[in-house]
Amino acid sequence: MSKKRLILNDMPDEQYALIGRAIRSFSAIEHELGRAIIALLGGPVAIEANPDLDKRAKNILKNMLAGRLSEFVNLLKQARPDLNDWADDFQAKLEDGIKLRNAFVHGTWESTPDNKMRLTFYPRDAFTKNEPPKCWEFSVRQMQEIDSQNLCNLQLLVKNFAPIV
């Protein structure tokens, strides 16, 4: 595979803002998953009072978004078996978003002549496997929908699982 030099073109402010909003909403979900995990472990006071629980919480919170999601779902299912179906649905929704999140943060963006945002992302092993990059094109509306869905998921976490600090 020959490596092509990447030349970035300038983008309209609206496109930069849409990309920034989406990345911000992914980061907020990661943060709120951490808070939800703390709540499911009994809250900050309970965690600080129990060295084993404190160590467990710290190990869980070292995880990135995908790991936090998995831990959140496991803890929720243990604490509330009646929410198993909801937890599975929530995890499925967020797993699709997590794949995009990694590309959004680690990929390169450019504006297309038809006012779309092109994202090019090389997964970690793309070069060693001689695979082409993954590419997407997003319209303004699609980017708004991604941000909107992230904010809905964020509100679910904040409303139902955030600990009182």
Image: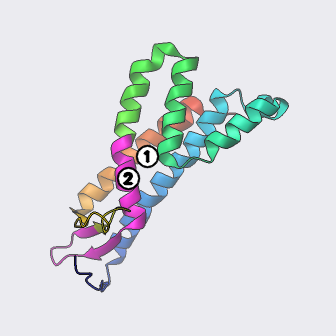
| Residue at the farthest left position | 114
**Quadrant where the N terminus is found in the figure:** bottom left
Q: Is residue 34 visible?
A: yes
Q: Residue 20 placed where, x, y %?
A: 43, 65
Q: In the image, which residues are magenta?
A: 95-119
Query: Would you call the spot at circle 1 few (<14 residues within 10 Å), some (14-19), or many (20 or more)?
Result: some
Using residue 136 as the reference point, say whether residue 36 is left or right of it.
right
Q: Is residue 113 left or right of residue 82?
A: left
Q: Quick one: 130 or 110, which is closer to the camera?
A: 130
The residue depicted at 25 percent of the width and 76 percent of the height is 111
Please name whichever residue, 10 or 69, is drawn nearer the observer in this view of the structure.
Answer: 69
On the image, the x and y values in percent for residue 62 come to 62, 48
Asked which quadrant contains residue 45, the reply is top right
Q: Can you identify the residue that label 2 sits on?
A: 147
Which residue is the site of mark 1? 151
Q: Are marks 2 and 1 in contact (CB under 8 Å)?
A: yes
Side of 141 where 49 appears, left or right: right
CA distance for labels 2 and 1: 6 Å
Q: Is residue 93 above or below residue 113?
A: above
Disc 2 crowd rating (10 Å Cα; few below 14, some 14-19, many 20+) is many
Q: Quadrant of residue 11?
A: bottom left
Residue 21 vertical placement versus 13 (above, below): above
Q: Residue furthest right?
A: 49
Position of residue 13 relative to residue 75, above or below, is: below
Query: Is residue 107 highlighted in magenta?
Result: yes
Q: Residue at x 54, y 17 (%)?
A: 80
Q: Nearer the viewer, residue 148 or 99?
A: 99
Circle 2 — which element?
helix
Question: Residue 15's quadrant in the figure?
Answer: bottom left
